[in-house]
Image: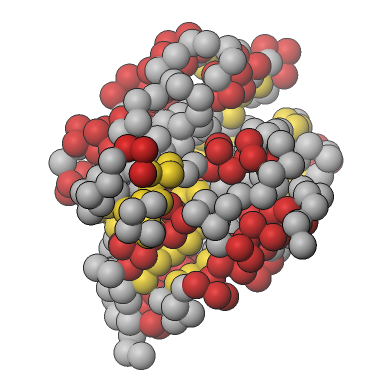
Amino acid sequence: MSQNPDAIAPHGGQLVNRIATPEQRAEFLSKADFLPRVQLDDRTVSDVEMIAIGAFSPLTGFMNQEDCDRTVTEMRLANGLVWSIPITLSVSEEVASPLQEGGLIRLDNSRGEFIGVLQLTQKYHYDKSREAIKVYRTDDAKHPGVQVLYSQGNVHLAGDIWLLQREPHPQFPTYQIDPAASRELFRENGWKTIVGFQTRNPIHRAHEYIQKCALETVDALFLHPLVGVTKDDDIAADVRMRCYEILLEHYYPHDRVVLAINPAAMRYAGPREAIFHALVRKNYGCTHFIVGRDHAGVGDYYGTYDAQYIFDEFEPTELGIVPMKFEHAFYCTRTKQMATSKTSPSKPEERIHLSGTKVREMLRRGELPPPEFSRPEVAAELARAMQIQIPA
């Protein structure tokens, strides 16, 4: 197909690239044994990766105090650009104390491997309680995002980063499509409108329904499952990816859907994370973004449609990506198909409501999700992974 210009500009206008050039990499490696070291957890490693590939554009590194404070309190960067989740590097007082502002810091992963460099511009303290209430809408330490926040060090390190080199994903290298590559793929296919879909669950029938409704009005679907750090009880990424492959093979148009991994970690920040997820998909080149029931929610911390309402707090031109808001879909036993309250004449007792939580609970009980919940091939794959006996 003919080449098209980008359908949508990256957030802030330019796609960031913080992957070291061969010359920069050689220089950093030559200094490796002499630089002060900070060891990162897996979540922060994924943040380094997302910054470097441009998925967190316009961020070029970890936030300084002004950007962080305004993000927490107003959902904006210091320059006024919409941004809803603080992206910060936290360390203990002991680690922070000897580090000199203006110097280079070696960034190691959890295995002690040299993965990147931080140009330290600022060290600052922050208010964990305020961040919990503002970002997560709760200071309950049982909330998984708040739990991570409270366990962090008390000092943030700010500054630009460089990723030493882009490594193939250890599990899903063929699905590692970074923002520059996804944008090129969309151009090659001549797609002008692309809808992104965020998920950390195997796709159930309700997901399939809203994705296909969206596909009726746009050129393509960018199915973008998150494969970074999630809760321990979430279904493993490799299982989910096999389920996506099966579903796309049997039930989706092959020429209008792209499956790619999102290397980010989950925050479980509900409405704030919905905005964040939309901006990230904008950087990947999506023009639209699906926002369904309780997006990025956990437990009962957020209202059913709070993640949709928050988009109304911003002018559409500020976000630069169109939210596609869907009601809670269900299987209608009267019409024998997926529907919402907008399309179904059924009574409440004729509706089978689906959710990723319900599917996980069934699997943990050793139960196979029924066809109303999940396509049979997907259910069989989940059963195999969970070692559930499939009835003859």
In what quadrant of the picture does the C terminus appear?
Answer: bottom right
Position of 32 compared to 75: left or right? right
Q: Nearer the viewer, residue 163 or 242?
A: 242
Q: Is residue 94 visible?
A: yes
Q: Residue at x 57, y 47 (%)?
A: 201
- Asked if residue 343 is positioned above or below residue 265 in the image, the reply reads below
Residue 40 showing in the rendered view: no
- Residue farthest toward the bottom in the current orientation of the protein: 1
Residue 224: give x, y in percent of width and height. Answer: 50, 57
Residue at (20, 32) in percent of width and height: 313
Residue located 33% across and 68% down the image: 215
At 58% from the left edge and 24% from the top edge, which residue is drawn?
144
| In front of the other: 245 or 220 | 245
Q: Residue 89 location, x and y as percent?
A: 59, 29
Q: Quadrant of residue 74?
A: top left
Looking at the image, which is closer to me, 367 or 4?
367
- Is 119 above or below relative to 333? above
96 left or right, relative to 304 = right
Image quadrant holding the N terminus, namely bottom left
> x%, y% of residue 281?
40, 54
Image height of 195 relative to 360, above or below:
below
